[in-house]
Amino acid sequence: MEPGWASEHLQVIRTLMERAAVYRRALAPTTLVTGGIGAAAALIGWFMRIESPRGFGLFWIAVSVVAVCGAFWAVRSQALKDQEPFWSPPMRRVTQALLPPLVAGLVAALLVVLPEGAPPARVWWLPPIWMVLYGCALHAAGFFMARGIKLFGWGFMVLGCACAVAVSLRLDADGLPALRNAHWLMGATFGGLHLAYGAYLYLTEKRKNAA
């Protein structure tokens, strides 16, 4: 192990510990922004009747890109407010932790929706796959952030596994509902769960500051 790398790694850990409160404050607006985008996208997808396999997949890929940009915007705004550098070594560590599962989710989506004539039943597997991979991303980032984000990641992984079981059972029984209904599943998880977690962070932080 190179001494320079070890020294930098220890400095990053020390900085993360010192800025734990800052990152916790940044989580509230980030999750609220992400949840708002997810909930709005579910409504748009439902009312615009985006229900073809390719349309559904490409629509939610675009939504995820917007959500990631919105999250980084929220983090940057919080960093400027607290006079902290945005692209700091800790921020790079968190981004590196998030990246592999998110890229895997993108590849899985492209493999499902890009081939011509993808059946709707195949596309129904995307929401649980995305939930599990997103939960893995949050859990990985939790090693550099507040402990709650790891529990939040576990929630997505458990829900994703449960949804995968439900999809499998419906395939073996009377079939799956119209793909249009998958927008509500995406909105309830990627929208509703983020809004709930963001509200919890905001309220607990507000009570802490009042005390």
Image (tube, helix red, strand yellow):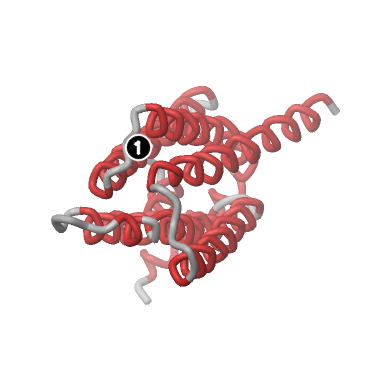
Q: Residue furthest front?
A: 174
Residue at 45% of width from left, 43% of height from top? 181
Q: Residues within 10 Å of mark 1 (few under 14, many from 20)?
A: some
Tell me if 86 is positioned left or right of 146 in this view. left
Q: What is the secondary structure assignment of the residue under circle 1?
A: helix
Query: Circle 1 is placed at which residue position?
Result: 63
Residue at 36% of width from left, 64% of height from top? 4
Q: What is the quadrant of residue 123 in the picture?
A: bottom left
Residue at 57% of width from left, 58% of height from top? 159
The N terminus, quarter of image? bottom left
Q: Position of residue 164 (x, y in %)?
A: 49, 65
The C terminus, quarter of image? top right
Q: Position of residue 98 (x, y in %)?
A: 41, 54
Along the line of sight, the residue nearer the viewer: 178 or 36: 178
Q: Position of residue 114 (x, y in %)?
A: 17, 54
Residue at 65% of width from left, 38% of height from top? 196
Q: Residue furthest bottom?
A: 1
- Asked if 121 appears above or below 3 in the picture, the reply is above
Along the line of sight, the residue nearer the viewer: 154 or 61: 61
> Can I make out residue 84 in this image?
no
Q: Position of residue 75 (x, y in %)?
A: 47, 33
Q: Amino acid at mark 1?
A: Val
